[in-house]
Amino acid sequence: MKESLLLTPGPTNVPKRVLDKTALPMIHHRTKEFQGILERVNANLQKIFLTRGPVMTFASSGTGAMEASITNLLSKGDTVIVVTAGKWGERYREIAQAYGLNVKSYEIPYGQAVTLEVVEKALSEHREAKAMLTTLCETSTAVMHPVREIAQLTRKTDTLLFVDAISGLMCDPLKMEEWGIDVVVCGSQKGLMLPPGLGFVALSDRAVAAIAKSTLPKYYFNFEQTIKAIKKNDTPFTPAVNLIRGLDEALLMLLEEGVENVWARHARVAEFVRQNMKVLGLTLFSQAPSSGLTAVKMPAGIDSKDLIKTMRDQHQVVMANGQGELQGKIVRFAHMGFACTLPDAKTGLDAFTDALKKAQSVQAPAV
Amino acid sequence: MKESLLLTPGPTNVPKRVLDKTALPMIHHRTKEFQGILERVNANLQKIFLTRGPVMTFASSGTGAMEASITNLLSKGDTVIVVTAGKWGERYREIAQAYGLNVKSYEIPYGQAVTLEVVEKALSEHREAKAMLTTLCETSTAVMHPVREIAQLTRKTDTLLFVDAISGLMCDPLKMEEWGIDVVVCGSQKGLMLPPGLGFVALSDRAVAAIAKSTLPKYYFNFEQTIKAIKKNDTPFTPAVNLIRGLDEALLMLLEEGVENVWARHARVAEFVRQNMKVLGLTLFSQAPSSGLTAVKMPAGIDSKDLIKTMRDQHQVVMANGQGELQGKIVRFAHMGFACTLPDAKTGLDAFTDALKKAQSVQAPAV
């Protein structure tokens, strides 16, 4: 069976070097060998998140890590601002609501990026806000939000900036410490080139200081215990040993290439895909596109599910449909992580072009 | 490097058949291929937990699954009875306390099993209790608690029985539905022969009915959404795709052997280890030993860490020390999951015997 090319916004293809590490014979986690791995992983995660603060790894999906950022840094009734323009910003809002936070929601239309005007307005209307929650790459619309500029505003206030960078990290630039972002959340199966199963949360100094004030209940996701454990190259609970051995390898690969080079590769491939979509006469959905994926609007009368099916069945290329109201209306063509190369993008474009042609020929049969 | 024999109470050695599945090229989780795997996994989990109710799989450690059982079935202020005789019963108690439950704790001395007298007393003193929390195999003391008999008492009341079977399942017998247990929690890295990274929760009908009454906050661990997703061979959040492919294989292996045969193998190996410890003139710590591991008391003047070091460094055999106050006083010799065979136990016993001799010769040098 031919291996599929996953041009979906996660999971993405995983390098064989990484997969091989995930299948090594089991070792115990309370050993010098595994402690050595944890020490290297924790140091290398800081080089990827670009922070000197703690970067915590949990056995969980990215959503679990988002939830952990809420339960460990906030308390019931705290005001939080959510600035959102898509499904993933809405997920952060839902989690905040599930924990009884006083949520102030600022919605930007799908396809657009969060504007600094809205951020400034929100911060001035809610000076009491403990946190602002937003997204780096909004994969539902393929938009990159200007988190660098947002942080320039939040860092002057007492409002902590939480960024869901689950699909954005290592695709779109993010310099956590330099830009003054307080919380960065990530997942393993996107830019980090791993199978799903790990979630990450990185904290600034002032986010670490907020832990002691939080009264929301928590147990498994516990930042205080996790930070203590990191200092001893340990984990509070049994870690996902083999996924972490894979993480070790994936981080080495990313650092061999260099963080800035990885970002540049994503920008280059993204530009290539966008240009080719324009050549095909198609319009992009996103008005501020991320380098992790491209959302392409379907011409009138064409359903994206037909293209996706043709690509999958005839080309072994997997792309994603739109979500919610965008279902059928866009194709989401990811160039994320290990599958972000010009040859992979070319394969994807060839499949897409063929599928589009077939969909159009069905729609308008030759006279 | 020679592969270590993990005779620790988790992680245990993982069969190559299973490891190979965890390293397959990545596939997307919203595909027919992965839905087929989920369908088979969910059906086979029911054959392992011996229930027709839902068995949910989470990307998390076993502790996350324990926490999920509390947050999804109970509410703040609910009375819960904890019957405990070791570190893992205490963990369930800690989680209940972290969520503001009204915890009634009944402690049995370490090394002993929970008695039915204590269970009856607890149930009669707290008829209002929504749940009783206990443990199948208390790995800190190598005790098996009589969950079958406990369930005969709880099933006549409105108190749900929650059993932490993280290290017990597939080592000690447990017939969830027949015995009338309401909640069974498990982890992947013990009797289920997988790497760590998955947690499981199985529910009886009356446990499912309790979900709607629970008001504790939750998001990632959400039983209502997870049960809905299971019915569609789906998951609410991105699952740990490759660990689940490994789970699929491990469940097939266990079912090929047969559940009762797996239990019988554990009982046979456990008996072999216990008999040989007696031949060595040693005493067992546990007064009601589990079939998953044996806890052996150290003779006076011998520190278990010395034996553990000799076994690890000279025999590549890994066993566990006691925890907390039992540190240095016992060796925990596991025969759990894939490493529960007579040859593996024999290798463990040879290493143990050699290490004991060396420790004794240091203690009393030849005249």
Image (cartoon, coloured by chain):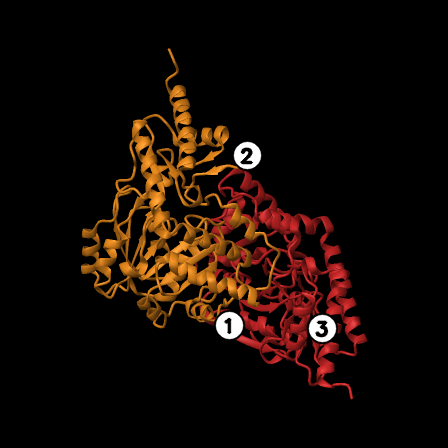
Chain colours: A red, B orange
Q: Is residue A271 left or right of residue A170?
A: right
Comparing labels 2 and 1, the label whose residue is closer to the camera: 2
Say if A36 sits above or below B55 in the image.
above
Say if B310 sits above or below A246 in the image.
above
**Three-letter amino acid code at the position of disc 3:** Ala
- The residue positioned farthest toward the top in the image shown: B367
Structural distance between the alpha carbons of marks 3 and 2:
53 Å
Q: Which element carries disc 2, helix, strand or loop? A: loop
User: Which quadrant would the C terminus of chain A be assigned to in this image?
Assistant: bottom right
Are labels 2 and 1 on one chain? no
Residue bearing mark 2: B2
Tell me residue B278's x, y (percent): 29, 30
User: Which quadrant would the N terminus of chain A be assigned to in this image?
Assistant: bottom right
Q: Is residue A309 left or right of residue B87?
A: right
**Three-letter amino acid code at the position of disc 2:** Lys
Residue bearing mark 3: A288
**Three-letter amino acid code at the position of disc 1:** Glu
Chain of residue at mark 3: A
Q: Which residue is nearer to you in this view: B333 or A350?
A: A350
The answer to which quarter of the image holds residue B282 is: top left
Residue bearing mark 1: A94
Name the residue located 42 percent from the left edge and 58 percent from the top edge. Answer: B200
